[in-house]
Amino acid sequence: MSDPTQTVLHRLRELIGPDLEQTNHLIRQHLDSEVELIPTLGTHLIQSGGKRLRPMLTLLSARMFGYQGEAHALLAAVIEFIHTATLLHDDVVDKSNTRRGIATANSVWGNKAPVLVGDFLFSRSFQLLVRHGDLKVLGIIADACAIISEGEVLQLVASNDLKTDEEKYMAVVASKTASLFSAACQIGPVLAGCPDADVKRMADFGTAIGIAYQVVDDTLDYAATVEKLGKTIGDDFQEGKITLPVIHAFAHGAPEERDFWVRTIEKGEITPDSLEQAIAMIRKRGGLDYSMSRARDFARAARDALEPYPHSAEREALLMLADFSVDRSF
Amino acid sequence: MSDPTQTVLHRLRELIGPDLEQTNHLIRQHLDSEVELIPTLGTHLIQSGGKRLRPMLTLLSARMFGYQGEAHALLAAVIEFIHTATLLHDDVVDKSNTRRGIATANSVWGNKAPVLVGDFLFSRSFQLLVRHGDLKVLGIIADACAIISEGEVLQLVASNDLKTDEEKYMAVVASKTASLFSAACQIGPVLAGCPDADVKRMADFGTAIGIAYQVVDDTLDYAATVEKLGKTIGDDFQEGKITLPVIHAFAHGAPEERDFWVRTIEKGEITPDSLEQAIAMIRKRGGLDYSMSRARDFARAARDALEPYPHSAEREALLMLADFSVDRSF
């Protein structure tokens, strides 16, 4: 428990323990299918020690606005299903080998099953949303799903292209990652029957925390140790993904550094030494510090969004999550 | 127009021309995204001369039950979007090179974009369904999507496994193909506010026509010419898919024939002569005739489902589609 990351997660789980347990129960229950490979593959990823960050946002925001019902646990499970579906498809698209410290589904079962099980999780999510029966929630999640896939395609188009600037990068991050954080946070005030202004404010909170989270993720890919991150460091580099540390290093690099980035990221001419050189150049140009400072800007924006609300254990927990999205080791 | 397939499609298009035009217009409109690759890739497949069979089922069944509104065109577009999404993912999963006589999206853009654009089409479909706002329709389509992906996974598990019998094969076909036909047919009576008994009857009609259609598809893969089918003949064989012609030929084959199927379908030991030998063995054991007779059984069941309804141009058109699902050249 000395690791601050674990400490934060532990405190959150104490606060919303029973809700989170109910969400985990519903995840197991609704992952079920007569086609055995579906729960097998779904469980492989979903039970592999994900942080449950997005469902926690739903649970906390519902309670913060005084929601007294039980539906928030189901909707939190839906949010985790959609997150898992995107991870399954992402790992196929990125040809990733490890995630959360274990082998990815595609590296165990090949590409076919993860594509199809991802589709199943999307579909199951909408079945559960229909059963819940709130068109407003359905709309929030359908919109988020469309924006996520647009963001993923945008990222694909931008990959290997050093003309991608910070603005375009932020657009990708806002779509592919922050839109689901935002949806997760909107569900609370919607369930509690709050005015649109509250829903909007929680959407902003979720977007900001989601962007901070992803920027840190992209920074850790050049900074973390493999053991802590639970996935291979340097994956983004190998894939030619244009993330903030690279954008900064390329923009401020000397001509020979810019040549290096063109050779590696754009042309894919990667040697065994390339990643080490890339990390050195990013550090030399302050790319990690710059990225972390941008992440902190968004964490601050997230905190600001909650400013108008009175003190409550749930509000403090959400503020803690805003900080955690930046100050985490994995 | 001497080709009977074209003649049938032509007559149907005359009957529901304006509705189908409106559906095509909505397809183009809602395929739009700021991320250009999405409409580019979506249009590639969706405008490439698909028969629009499933949307036609929605349009005809709505009019047959006296629906006077406009929403059927939008829901028909949604059905085509979902169909297209499954095709995009299917072609990635099957590594197919051609469909409808043109290169598949994955063979042009690689695997990444079709996975993500498929996800976009699923999400866009649910956005449109939410906008339409009928939870019953949403439920029908969400259920169909979940059953489709279960069927696809079931097919994946059954592939290369000659223990797959006709019952299991029919379960795969009912899930992966017929469930969307069934959903397409249920929308009409739901829109028209008909009792559940009508919805159930149209579900049965759709299931039967869908099974007939897929069994014929699987038969054409060992019988059609490439020019007519618009895709490579023998794809299922190469992939080790267990379809009805193979199940029949294996069940009734002499020991040396059964050895051949084990070598090719189960072990993937395929030589340049294998497909020709497979076709010869299937023909010798009457596998094509048997499959077509089973398809005709389902087409008859589809016709029977419409028995109680009075004569109308739409009902006759649906009966014609039941026959067409069997007597077609592509």
Image (cartoon, coloured by chain):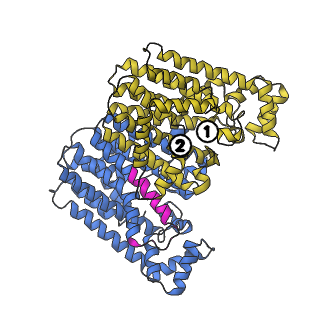
Chain colours: A blue, B yellow
| Residue type pointed to by label 2 | Leu
- Horizontal and vertical percent for residue A316? 23, 58
> In the image, is residue B193 above or below residue B44?
above
* Mark 2, residue position: A116
Can residue A27 be seen here? The reply is no
State the quadrant of the N terminus of chain A: bottom left
The alpha-carbon separation of the residues under discs 2 and 1 comes to 9 Å
For the C terminus of chain A, the quadrant is: bottom left
> Which one is in front, A10 or B263?
B263
Stretch in magenta:
A146-166
Q: Residue furthest front?
A: B1
- The residue labelled by disc 1 is B156
Q: Are marks 2 and 1 in contact (CB under 8 Å)?
A: yes
Q: What is the chain identity of the residue bearing mark 1?
A: B
Residue B98 makes an appearance in the image: yes
Q: B102 left or right of A237?
A: right
Q: State the predominant SS element of the stretch in magenta.
A: helix
